[in-house]
Amino acid sequence: MNDDDFPFHEPFGPEYVRPKSANCPRCPCHTSRVCEGFQWHLASTPTYPDGSSYTEPCPCEQAASVPEDRTVLIELDGVLREVSAQYHRTGLLTGRLVTTRVFRAESPALGECPVAVPMALYRPKADTDSRLVVIDSVGEKWVMGFTAQHNLQRYRIAGWSDGRA
Ligand SMILES: [Zn+2]
Ligand SMILES: [Zn+2]
């Protein structure tokens, strides 16, 4: 019996080769790691096989620039409601979930805000007070943000805008 007949394969052989990052199946310009992680801003400018720069916008990045519709359960003044919201993956509100205008807000200097305001929620951190954490329609956790703005003035969200409690 020579070595070629030995029934066991080298157990670690192929694993030693670090796998090349797979290409994204939905675009011609990035790896899956970049698109699934929304990391286009970190990726180097994609190039064609001949080395010239890729000029078309990335379809994955473009799709992500459209805010994603979700709903979120928010309890305020002891009233729990399901509120429509949009999750922003890019742009000025990157990483925030912004609700429709269903809140009233106040400021010590200006009094009641004349318009209903949206709430911008953000990701919980390790030390976030769990009483401020809410869950959206895809099961992601968010922290309620109580700062609102109107005409460049800061207000604080104080309740539901229609006053029902
Ligand atoms: Zn992609
Ligand atoms: Zn791409």
Image (cartoon, grey):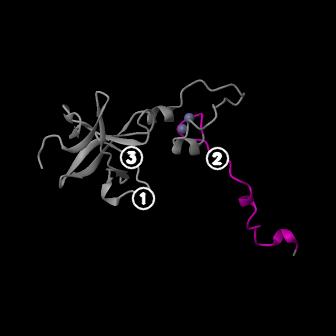
What secondary structure prevails in the magenta region?
A: loop
- Asked which secondary structure carries label 3, the reply is loop
Residue annotated with mark 2: 21
* Type of amino acid at the residue the image marks with label 1: Asp
Q: What distance separates the C-alpha of mark 3 from that of mark 1?
A: 13 Å
* Type of amino acid at the residue the image marks with label 3: Tyr
In the rendered image, the quadrant that contains the N terminus is bottom right
Q: In the image, which is nearer the foreground, mark 2 or mark 3?
A: 3
The one of 1 and 8 positioned closer to us in this rendering: 8
Residue 19 shown in magenta: yes
Residue 102 shown in magenta: no
Q: In the image, which is nearer the foreground, mark 1 or mark 2?
A: 1
Image position of 7 with respect to 55: above or below: below
Residue annotated with mark 3: 122
Where is residue 154? Give x, y as percent: 30, 35
Q: Find the residue positioned furthest to the left.
A: 164
Do the numbered discs 3 and 1 sit on residues whose CB atoms are within 8 Å? Answer: no
Total of numbered circles in the picture? Answer: 3
Q: In the image, which is nearer the foreground, mark 3 or mark 1?
A: 1
Region in magenta = 2-30
The one of 110 and 45 positioned closer to us in this rendering: 110
Where is residue 149? Give x, y as percent: 30, 34
- Asked which secondary structure carries label 2, the reply is loop
Residue at image coords 55%, 36%: 40
* Type of amino acid at the residue the image marks with label 2: Ser
Do the numbered discs 2 and 3 sit on residues whose CB atoms are within 8 Å? Answer: no
Residue at image coords 68%, 48%: 20
Which numbered tag is attached to residue 127?
1
Residue at image coords 43%, 42%: 95
